[in-house]
Image: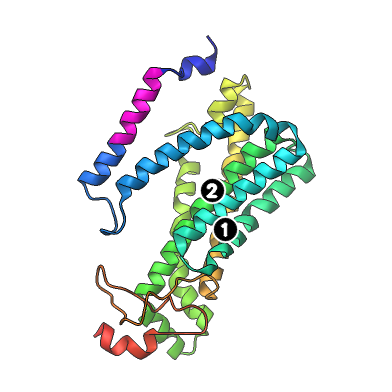
Amino acid sequence: MTAVASLLPVNVKLGVLLFALLLVAAGVTHWFRLSPDSGVDRRKQILVAGVRAAVQLAAVSLVISWAVTALSGLLTFLVVMFGVAVRTAGRRLTGNHTWWLTAAPIAAGVVPVVAALLLTGLVPPEGIALIPITGILIGGALTVTVLAGRRALDELAQRHGEVEAAMALGFPDREARMEIARPAASDALLPGLDQTRTVGLVTLPGAFVGMLLGGASPLMAGAVQLFVLIALMAVQSVAVAVTVELVARRRLHRAAPGPQAVGLGRGQSVTADRAGPGSWPGRSRDKGATG
């Protein structure tokens, strides 16, 4: 029996356990009402995510040999990964036409790192090496883009009065919004930072374990994992910086839900940051909405 097979045999027991764990995740979410409001069903999202993951991994297993052996397959695979990441991040941040701008932070973080790897010869231009490394980096950029964007947009919507106060003191619009958005968005870096600080003490990440199972020496596996963690921090830092800049400049924004007044309570609509570039609905309604 190989090392991989002894670690996690693929059989009926595995399928039953996966199904049970998925039900546990959905059940706990439903029982403790872990949804932001009645319009979002996290239980359903968890179930759908689990089924999608199984289908997508099965599909990847069928096409991965083509992707790692043919140049056309490699390029197609990378483009699909990037496109799905952009669409996923965009949908999490906004429902309007600005969603596609999430391509900027993801590309700004990932492309320079991958280019540096290829130019230095550390990674060969082959699918077997490029696909997993690029996928890890795109996934990391996707995560922080969503976290930074949501935190920045939510913070600006809730604290629009502070933005106006800063502008009244002479701050340009970008700088006023940046002072509110940047501290909140920077929290998106914490998961990656904690993962790097605790590696080897709390967890043994996938790249490390995978290389060991593949027959690599512990030293080589550790070096590759160290590179992945450091590269992820670089990618994520750039992605967060670009996301905050897009939000501060009103390039990436949320659509206004309607002409209702701005509300600050739970469940109320906040439109101050959602009208898009060139408008500021909070100015004409602050007095009536925040009093």
Contact between marks 1 and 2 (CB within 8 A): the answer is: yes
Vertical side of 257 occupied by 52: above or below: above
Residue 69 horizontal side relative to residue 159, left or right: right
Would you say residue 161 is visible in this rendering? yes
Query: Is 14 within the magenta?
Result: yes
Q: How many marks?
A: 2
User: Circle 1 — which element?
Assistant: helix
Query: Which picture quadrant has residue 169?
Result: bottom left
Query: Which picture quadrant has residue 106?
Result: bottom right
For the residue pair 207 and 31, the one nearer the viewer reads as 31
Furthest toward the left, the residue is 31
Q: Residue at x 58, y 35 (%)?
A: 225
- Label drawn at residue 239: 1
Residue type at tag 1: Ala
Q: Magenta part of the protein: which range?
A: 12-23
Residue receiving disc 2: 140
